Image: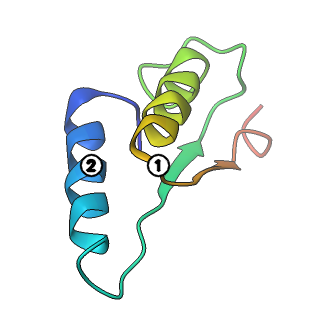
Amino acid sequence: MSGGVDSSATAALLKSEATTSSHHAAALTIMVLPPIARAPCCAGQDIHDARDVAERIGIPHYVLDYGKPFP
């Protein structure tokens, strides 16, 4: 989840479907660059945006940090 409109809307739709089925919804953001890098997606403010959206729609948010392998 990037925190943008597309992924946020999709997460909200999945959350609404999960409440009527046996499925569970969660948000996952994969950080591929160090937080200080200027990245077009999934770093810094985007992670905060995704976390805020996940909290608002009531799903857990996880961040996987894959930025360390890239110098």
Q: Position of residue 60 (x, y in %)?
A: 57, 54
**Residue 30: numbered disc:** none
Which residue corresponds to the image point at 39% horizontal and 43% vertical from the top-left?
A: 57
Badge nearest the viewer, 2 or 1: 1
Q: Is residue 36 above or below residue 10?
A: above
Dot 1 falls on a residue whose secondary structure is loop
Number of callouts in the render? 2
Figure quadrant of the C terminus: top right
Crowd rating for badge 1 (residues with CA inside 10 Å; few <14, some 14–19, many 20+): few
Residue 29 horizontal side relative to residue 10, left or right: right
Q: Position of residue 62 (x, y in %)?
A: 63, 52
Residues at discs 2 and 1 in contact (Cβ within 8 Å): no
Q: Position of residue 42 (x, y in %)?
A: 50, 31
Which residue corresponds to the image point at 55% horizontal and 15% vertical from the top-left?
A: 45
Crowd rating for badge 2 (residues with CA inside 10 Å; few <14, some 14–19, many 20+): some
Among all residues in the image, which is located at the extreme bottom? 22
Viewer-proximal residue among 35 and 69:
35
The three-letter amino acid code for the residue at tag 1 is Gly
Which residue corresponds to the image point at 56% horizontal and 47% vertical from the top-left?
A: 30
Q: Give the quarter of the image for residue 35.
A: top right
Q: CA distance from mark 2 to mark 1?
A: 9 Å
Dot 2 falls on a residue whose secondary structure is helix
Viewer-proximal residue among 24 and 40:
24
Figure quadrant of the N terminus: top left
The three-letter amino acid code for the residue at tag 2 is Ala
Residue underneath mark 2? 12
Residue 38 horizontal side relative to residue 8, left or right: right
Q: Position of residue 49 (x, y in %)?
A: 48, 23
Residue underneath mark 1? 58
Q: Is residue 37 above or below residue 16?
A: above
